[in-house]
Image: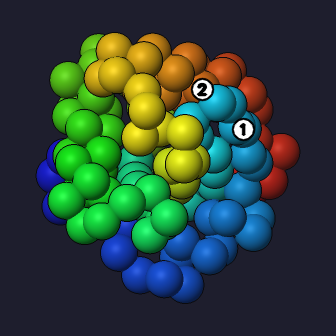
Amino acid sequence: MKKLNIIKKQDEIDKVIKQGIMFKNKFYFVYKLYNKDNKYYRFCICVSKKLGNAVVRNKNKRQIKDIIDKSNFVFSREYDYVIILRKEISLASFDEKRKYLLEILCKLEGEKNEKEI
């Protein structure tokens, strides 16, 4: 994942969570918000300390970034996404993580965001 595709500021993350549309499944909460100022889609991957120590959290974040990069999924430009990992993900295999993430992203892409300007 390129650096310009990453959301780093906390106020931007909070804005996506508060104003965006949300989908959830067994392993993820995913929020999506239209952002007219950006030319690229952007992601943020949030992992709680409840998930495990730093090694486990970073491993999960690396795997999610890898799934996003290597998928042939086409993301809508000008959208921000926040992916929050649930505690159950630590028990899942990589294939399960990939299946559930792509499933929820397909649902989000199918939805029309009513908050678009």
The numbered dot on residue 1 is none
- Within 10 Å of disc 2 (Cα), the crowding (few <14, some 14-19, many 20+) is some
Judge by depth and name the residue closer to the eye, 23 or 117: 23
The residue under the point 44% across, 69% down is 49
In this rendering, is residue 84 above or below 96? below
Q: Residue 75: image x %, image y %?
A: 43, 31
| Mark sitting earlier along the chain (1/2) | 1
Q: Nearer the viewer, residue 33 or 78?
A: 33
Residue at point 16%, 52% (across, down): 2
Circles 1 and 2 in contact, beta carbons < 8 Å: yes
Image quarter of residue 27? top right
Q: Which residue appears at 30% of the width and 65% of the height?
A: 53
Q: Position of residue 106 (x, y in %)?
A: 57, 20
Question: Which quadrant holds the C terminus?
Answer: bottom right
Instruction: Write the residue at 38% across / 67% down.
Output: 7
Q: Residues within 10 Å of mark 1 (few under 14, many from 20)?
A: some
Q: Is residue 27 above or below residue 87?
A: above
Q: Is residue 112 above or below residue 107?
A: below
For disc 1, the marked residue is 23
Q: Position of residue 69 (x, y in %)?
A: 22, 32
Q: Given the image, on which type of amino acid does mark 1 rest? A: Phe
Residue linked to disc 2: 104
Report which quarter residue 74 is drawn in: top left
- Three-letter code for the amino acid on which mark 2 is drawn: Ile
Instruction: Answer yes or no: is residue 72 visible.
Output: yes
